[in-house]
Image: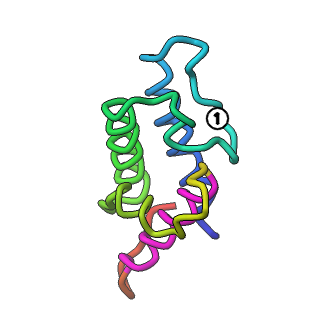
């Protein structure tokens, strides 16, 4: 959980990017338990834009490329995809991607 705060911030930044294109009543809350893809607030294109923004933010912060789609699919089907759940899954992907001797930017 060492990088969890940075990952959550990267997700919040992506939510902010997506919210700029949404009507105020459809905006996603920047909170740990916000359901993604927004309990129907995002259409498929908006969700795609969200995932791309998260990927770009993660790459900028950690200097690693991941697939947010892959991260989203890592959990149990019964577990809702929230900001917290996505951050945990991304953290796992980053951990699997990190090799000994390869630093992850903090």
The stretch drawn in magenta includes residue 92: yes
Task: Tell me the element at label 1.
Answer: loop
What secondary structure do most residues of the magenta stretch adopt?
Answer: helix
The stretch drawn in magenta includes residue 32: no
Expressed as whole percent of the image width and height from the top left, the position of residue 79 reads 61, 62
- Range drawn in magenta: 84-98
Relative side of 27 to 57, left or right: right
Q: Residue at x 35, y 53 (%)?
A: 59
Q: Count the numbered circles shown.
A: 1
Disc 1 target residue: 30
Q: Residue at the top extreme?
A: 23
Relative side of 2 to 58, left or right: right
Q: Quadrant of residue 66?
A: bottom left
Expressed as whole percent of the image width and height from the top left, the position of residue 38 reads 55, 36
Expressed as whole percent of the image width and height from the top left, the position of residue 13 reads 51, 36
Location of the N terminus (image quadrant)? bottom right
Q: Nearer the viewer, residue 41 or 65?
A: 41
Q: Nearer the viewer, residue 97 or 24?
A: 24
């Amino acid at each position: 959980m060492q990088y969890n705060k940075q990952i959550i911030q990267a997700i919040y930044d992506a939510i902010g990017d997506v919210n700029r294109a949404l009507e105020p009543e459809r905006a996603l809350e920047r909170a740990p338990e916000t359901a993604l893809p927004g309990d129907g607030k995002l259409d498929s294109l908006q969700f795609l834009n969200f995932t791309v923004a998260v990927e770009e933010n993660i790459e900028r912060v950690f200097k690693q490329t991941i697939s947010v789609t892959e991260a989203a699919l890592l959990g149990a089907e019964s577990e809702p995809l929230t900001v917290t759940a996505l951050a945990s899954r991304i953290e796992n992907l980053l951990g699997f991607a990190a090799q000994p001797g390869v630093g992850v930017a903090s």
